[in-house]
Amino acid sequence: MKQCRQMMWKGSGKMSGSFDRIMEERKKLVDQIIENMKQGYILPEPKWGVSPFTFHNPVSGAKYHGANMIKLYLYSAKFGYTDTRFMTYKQAQSKGWQIRKGEKGIRLEKFIFTKQVEQENPDTGQKEKITVRLQRPMVNTFVVFNASQIEGIETMEEMKPLEHNEVLELADQLIVSSECSVREEVQDKAYYRPASDTIVLPPRNAFISQEAFATTLMHEMVHSTGHWSRLDRPMLSKFGTPEYALEELRAELGAFFMGTDLGIEGSQKLLDSHTDYLKSWISVLEDDPNELFRACSDAQKAVERLSNNLKQHQELCQEKEAAIMEAVVVEEIADVDLGMKEILGEIKNDIPQALRKLQDEDRINTEVIEALEAMEKTEEVLQALNEAYEERKGITKRVIELTWNKQATQYETAIEEALEAAMIPEPEFEMEM
């Protein structure tokens, strides 16, 4: 088997050009990883400052996983890319963006698990295209470019890692969503025990950070997916064996993949902190470089299972919260309804009194209106009397004036007649000489 794997790795003249190209690209990646391991680390420290750094395609919305993610990580670190978006030449063109002249992309792998075939529909007799699963998946390659190599693309939105309290909340959600029991005990080791299907961790406050606790938890949870009732990987190998080293590599890669997807800062540093297995990993990869890709594939399958469990738990929590909120709203509506009934009851009891009050008010209003009308009539009468009085005053004044004028004339005539009757002629005197 070992010789067969080495022959497959080296390839032969009978292999297709696509297969040779894939093997060549894989060898470059494995050689780089081995070189890093010999220097004491797996991946270089990122230059983009923060994790998460989930590499994704902005056109299709797909995320790059497994070995493709490792390749993009190393590629970005080598050229100093801080943008995590990668796409093909045609995808960039479809958006009106342009790859700068002279830029070179990176070749990734794509596994094809299904294909479309024509099959006759027994009901209609017509041929229809259906999707069938391949017995053996096919692998192909494609070339992508970083957004930093593309003109016209908008600036990437800034990514922020989870806050410390959010990391602990996420860790608690992972524990609840775990398919095996998780215990925190006062001791200094973290491990997964297949026999009892149990994860044991030191107390969370014993870790250097919340991120270290969460990543260690994910490492052990990746181990737990190898249980026979789940993904069924060999889990009973002894320390120091290649099988044991490979399982540790799966767990390390899985925790790294999941940590970056969830936005836990420092996933790369925590990956590189576990260097006890570097010599074993180097030996395994030098013996069969394809083991890196198998480990990436197994790690990705484990992450997908854990992520689905976490998603289901979060959705269940959301449903419970929605149900609680609905119950609260229903209770509040019931309280309001009860309150309305009480108010309506009070109103119902007060209606007769209110009607009597309204009737009294109507009677009073009628009397007031009648009084006002009487006042208006009185004012009209007084106005008429006043006008008659003024008119009479005028007539009286004129009568008096006429009477006075008549009497005055009579008096004047009588005086004149009296004076005339009483007049005595003056005596005549002779002038003495």
Image: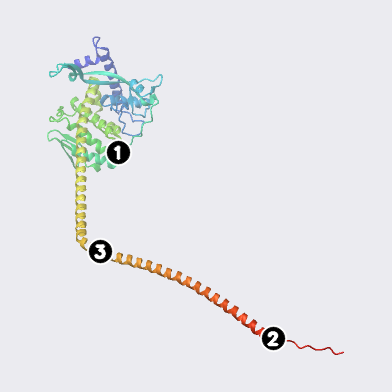
The amino acid at mark 3 is Gln
The amino acid at mark 1 is Leu
Pointer 1 with pointer 3, Cβ within 8 A: no
Q: Reply above or below: 5 against 255.
A: above
Element on which disc 3 rests: helix
Q: Reply above or below: 68 against 166.
A: above
Give the mark count. Answer: 3
Tell me the quarter of the image containing the C terminus.
bottom right
Residue tagged by mark 3? 359
Residue 95: tell me if it is visible: yes
Residue 315 picture location, percent across and down = 21, 37
Residue 225 picture location, percent across and down = 17, 31
Closer to the observer: label 2 or label 1? 2
Residue tagged by mark 2? 423
The circle drawn on residue 162 is: 1
Residue 188: tell me if it is visible: no
Which of the 4 image quarters holds residue 45?
Answer: top left
Instruction: Please report the residue visible at 30 percent of the width from the left and 22 percent of the height from the top.
Output: 32
Could you give the CA–CA distance between mark 2 and mark 3, rounded to whole angstroms?
Answer: 94 Å
Q: Earlier in the sequence, mark 2 or mark 3?
A: 3
Q: Reply above or below: 206 against 67.
A: below
Pointer 2 with pointer 3, Cβ within 8 A: no
Element on which disc 2 rests: loop
